[in-house]
Amino acid sequence: MSLLPSLSDLIARARTDLRMGLPVALRGPGGIVLAAAAETLGTERLADLAHLEGPALAITRRRADTLKARAYAADLARIPLPRDADLHWIRAVADPSGDLATPMKGPLQTLRAGDDAPARAALALAKSARLLPAALLAGAPDAPEGLTVLPLDGLHARLAEVPDLPEVVAAGLPIAAHVTTRLHVYRPTDGAEEHYAVEIGRPSRDAPVLARLHSACFTGDVLGSLKCDCGPQLHAALEQMGEAGAGVLLYLNQEGRGIGLSNKMRAYSLQDQGFDTVEANHRLGFEDDERDFRIGARLLDRLGFRAVRLLTNNPRKVDRLRAAGIDVVERVPLKVGQTRFNHHYLATKAAKSGHLL
Ligand SMILES: Nc1nc2c(ncn2[C@@H]2O[C@H](COP(=O)(O)OP(=O)(O)OP(=O)(O)O)[C@@H](O)[C@H]2O)c(=O)[nH]1
Ligand SMILES: [Zn+2]
């Protein structure tokens, strides 16, 4: 019946539930598994989950490696919940901010037997809710009334897909770089973040367009942070397009290379403790880059652009766009915004993430 929620609707709900500290119910061949995000779980719900069957804390392999816990799966580890575990213990396993101050968590036993699929889905949901990737899971005889119930079948595949991105609206927006500019807003059908396209001038759809895929950086774009080069890159790209009289800048709301602002600031706090940008992501349980550039390809396609001259220093963006069917005819370097505060950050990106200096 069309009035019932689709899988995308359920995913959108699940994200909100997890952010509020509510568990979601995952229905698979083994029955119902309840999953709650470690970051938002409260004391009473922890007590209730702890009384269910086989409570275990799922973390990513990245986090497991940091904690020296053995991950039997390629991507995650499940730690059986110790009998005396409280919220403090759960947060300490999930959140690296106290790793140096309280190295008390180990040795951590991990589970080999049992199905990893519910844990995998829960971690993907936590990531897509921009929470720390750690979730408490426990088997339940049935789903308590009122909880969001998601079928495990197809869930992980759906979370890995690019959602449909219909355009909500487009309107003229004269900006300093060019007076003939239009801002387009796209809203994904799975309730995730909206993305924007800034169309400068009237670029032809028949020739390669000067384009940039810019990932949101509140600290750099808005506050003028000196820790990264995002703000100057954003403005230089718009200026270059303005001077050329045509271009398209996709502003993708993938803050912090796709981990969200809270997690990015957690990474900054780890950087204050001496870890570099890649190490900080890993300690938090993330890959160094969690962005999905297929969204950029989808938006270019929607706008009618098949070929681009891409403003970037990141070869991965070029590769991902090409893999998604966009013809990147040229990579145009964008070297602005070096400061004494971001020298180490840019050098790390070059050494570890393949950026071209
Ligand atoms: N996790 C994390 N994200 C960061 C950090 N510093 C900046 N960012 C984010 O990194 C992203 C940078 O985006 P871009 O400038 O589009 O991408 P890029 O990979 O640097 O590639 P180009 O700028 O195109 O060369 C933004 O989402 C920032 O919020 C950091 O230390 N940790
Ligand atoms: Zn930045």
Image (cartoon, grey):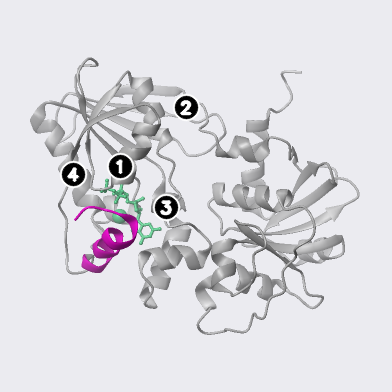
Is ligand 1 less than 8 Å from the beta carbon at label 1? yes
Spatial CA distance of label 3 from label 1 is: 14 Å
Estimate the x, y position of residue 275 in percent, counting from the top left: 39, 73
Instruction: Give the number of callouts.
Output: 4
**Residue shown at 42%/52% (left/top)?**
289
Residue 303 sits inside the magenta stretch: no
Query: Residue at 23% of width from left, 65% of height from top?
Result: 342
> Quick check: is the Cβ at mark 2 less than 8 Å away from ligand 1?
no
Q: Quadrant of residue 78?
A: bottom right
Q: Decide: marks 4, 2 in contact (CB < 8 A)?
A: no
Mark number displayed over residue 214:
1
Quarter of the N terminus within the rendering: top right
Q: Magenta part of the protein: which range? A: 343-357
- Against 328, residue 133 (above or below) is below
Amino acid on which the number 1 mark rests in the picture: His
Rate crowding at label 3 as few (under 14), some (14 to 19) or many (20 or more) other CA atoms within 10 Å.
some
SS of the residue at dot 4?
helix
Q: Distance between the residues labelled 2 and 3?
A: 22 Å
Residue 161: give x, y in percent of width and height.
54, 34
Question: According to the image, label 4 marks what residue?
Answer: 235
Dot 1: element: strand
Name the amino acid, label 3: Asp
Q: Is mark 3 within 8 Å of ligand 1?
A: yes
Nearer the N terminus, badge 4 or badge 2?
Answer: 2
- The CA span between labels 4 and 2 is 26 Å
Q: Mark 3 points at which residue?
A: 289
Which one is earlier in the sequence, the residue at label 2 or at label 3?
2
Q: Residues within 10 Å of mark 1 (few under 14, many from 20)?
A: many
| Residue underneath mark 2 | 165
Earlier sequence position, callout 1 versus callout 2: 2
